[in-house]
Amino acid sequence: MKKLLTFFFLLFSLFVFSQEYQFDKKCVSNSTRISPKIGNKNSWKSYIYFNSSNNNYYMTQRNDDSYYYITDNSLKEVIALQRINSEKPYYSYLDKKTFDYSYSEKEIGKIIIKELAEDEFLVQCFVNDDSKKTNLEVKFKLYKSKTPMIEIRFMDLGQIIHKKIYDSLKERLNGNNFWILYAEVDYKNGYKFLYEFDNCEEIALNLKFN
């Protein structure tokens, strides 16, 4: 009887804790350091995988290597995988980490959004209501899409700041069905970057693991 109960418990655990992700779109992500230029390496290319009917998660692949990272915004987790190339390629689970909300690299107490042109917005971040100077600025170029905006972590900053910016941007927009063409970031510490998302193609990739 005890063995039977153990079997059913294990079977139930596998059912409950299994995770499945489906991706139907793959896009190129180009990152360019506008200033300061450092050596000959000032731009990088990676890939982002999406589910066009579910904007709660996405997956990144850096520089065409074998490591993949699934960001699940609903579970607040980042899952690391490795693609094993063999006769039948497969994805091996490595580990997962929860978002660290214990700190923020920048203190942001106020956000102002200015519309520069059609579907082009400037997000200005301030430490508090009394601040005269911004400590972060992001210029977005958007276009309307059929699906809700995917909240990509594109800056070299944590999830807290990304969420504040996305929440403020979505509140300002007339609806949530937008795609980010590019984001130009002024970190207000001498560094400026351009993040572009384009060259999307249709794919069919299903990942399921326990």
Image (cartoon, rainbow, N blue to C red):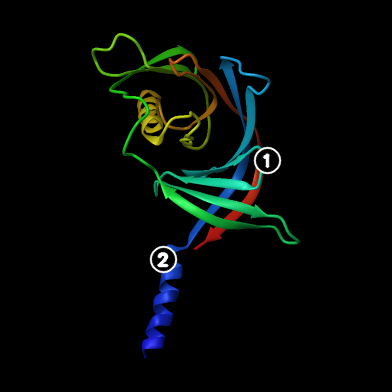
Task: In the rendered view, tell whether residue 36 sits above or below residue 17.
Answer: above
Which one is in front in this view, the residue at disc 1 or the one at disc 2?
Answer: 1
**Sequence-wise first label, 1 or 2:** 2
Answer left or right for 123 relative to 48.
left
Report the amino acid beneath label 2.
Val
Question: Split into 4 quadrants, where in the image is the N terminus?
Answer: bottom left
Percent x, y of residue 21:
53, 53
Distance from the alpha carbon under mark 1 to that under mark 2: 33 Å
Q: Secondary structure at mark 1?
A: loop
The structure residue drawn at horizontal position 62% and vertical position 35%, both measured from the top left corner, is 46
| Residue, disc 2 | 16
The structure residue drawn at horizontal position 53% and vertical position 50%, both measured from the top left corner, is 80
The structure residue drawn at horizontal position 72% and vertical position 61%, both measured from the top left corner, is 88
| Numbered circle sitting on residue 43 | none
- Residue 55 visible in the shown view: no
| Residue, disc 1 | 64
Q: Secondary structure at mark 2?
A: helix
Report the amino acid beneath label 1.
Asp
